[in-house]
Amino acid sequence: MARHVFLTGPPGVGKTTLIQKASELLKSSGVPVDGFYTEEVRQGGRRIGFDVVTLSGMRGPLSRVGLEPPPGRRECRVGQYVVDLAAFEQLALPVLKNAGSSSGPGQRVCVIDEIGKMELFSQPFIQAVRQTLSSPGTTVLGTIPIPKGKPLALVEEIRNRNDVKVFSDVMKCSEKRKWTKMPLISRFSFETCGTLSQTLKAEPLVIPGDVRLEKRELTARVLPPVLSPRCC
């Protein structure tokens, strides 16, 4: 059975939002959760880069437009964004090390959002991800990019692991608060919840009665409310 859960899909479909809500639910259920997510940074309505935010509240730059690399260091660039490798490693590596080496009882979750081109400039990060995936008692809840252009070695490695379940159906709300499918959000949410519930042996909760789904037959299924298909 799959032990780790990864979400994939185009930018902006809600992967990070779902990761955040799942983390909140797990924490409220008493499951130890650590890790980080990435968040875009805007200035004057324009995106100027991305930050790394740990679940403990620490924040630092991942990339910025026009960032100058330190003297003597090569430039790590993805499009217009230059990666601040030192700042990223300073925040992300201790989190992964702690998640992979914790000796406490019971299952724990490590959030890794995301494992993409920017993050993969870091060889220590690649090693830390592999170690975390192989750590007994640790479930990784992460995101990976959709296949595009040259394959990313670690991403393909993750996709092909026997202990990983990758979900590619992600939902998005329209401005009119109606679901648009990307392409089958309901199945995505239910399966993700089911995998997490089985992995973490958590008690699923019944969907609230006021939830309206695109497929009515799914209303009888069980899903923690924080992951239920309602507009975000």
Image (cartoon, rainbow, N blue to C red):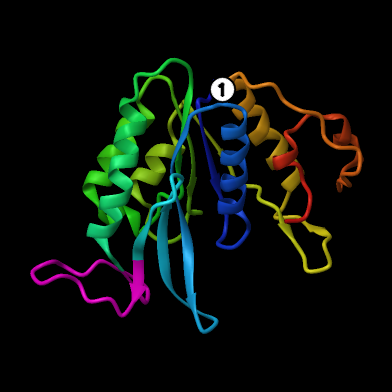
Horizontal side, residue 118 vs residue 56: left or right: left
User: Which region of the structure is painted magenta?
Assistant: 63-82
For the stretch drawn in magenta, the main secondary structure is: loop
Q: Quadrant of the C terminus?
A: bottom right
Residue type at mark 1: give it.
Thr
Whether residue 8 sits left or right of residue 185 in the image: it is: left
Q: Residue furthest top?
A: 105
Q: Is residue 218 left or right of residue 137?
A: right
x then y, percent, for residue 81? 35, 72
Q: Kindly identify the residue that appears in the image at 42 percent across and 65 percent down.
A: 50
**Image quarter (top left, top right, bottom left or bottom right) of the N terminus:** top right
Above or below residue 193? Residue 124 is below
| Residue 173 drawn at (x, y percent) | 75, 60
Say which residue label 1 marks. Answer: 199
Q: Is residue 69 magenta?
A: yes
- For mark 1, does the 10 Å Cα neighbourhood hold few (<14), some (14 to 19), or many (20 or more) residues? many
The quarter holding residue 198 reads top right
- In the image, residue 198 above or below residue 115: above
Quadrant hosting residue 189: top right
The residue drawn where x is 28% and y is 38% is 128
Is residue 166 shown in magenta? no
Q: The residue tagged with tag 1: helix, strand or loop? A: helix
Percent across and percent down for residue 179 are 80, 57
Judge left or right: residue 148 versus residue 172: left
* Residue under the image location 27 percent in, 64 percent down: 84
Q: Is residue 36 visible?
A: no
Q: Position of residue 109 (x, y in %)?
A: 48, 31
Report the residue that reaches farthest toward the bottom. Answer: 44
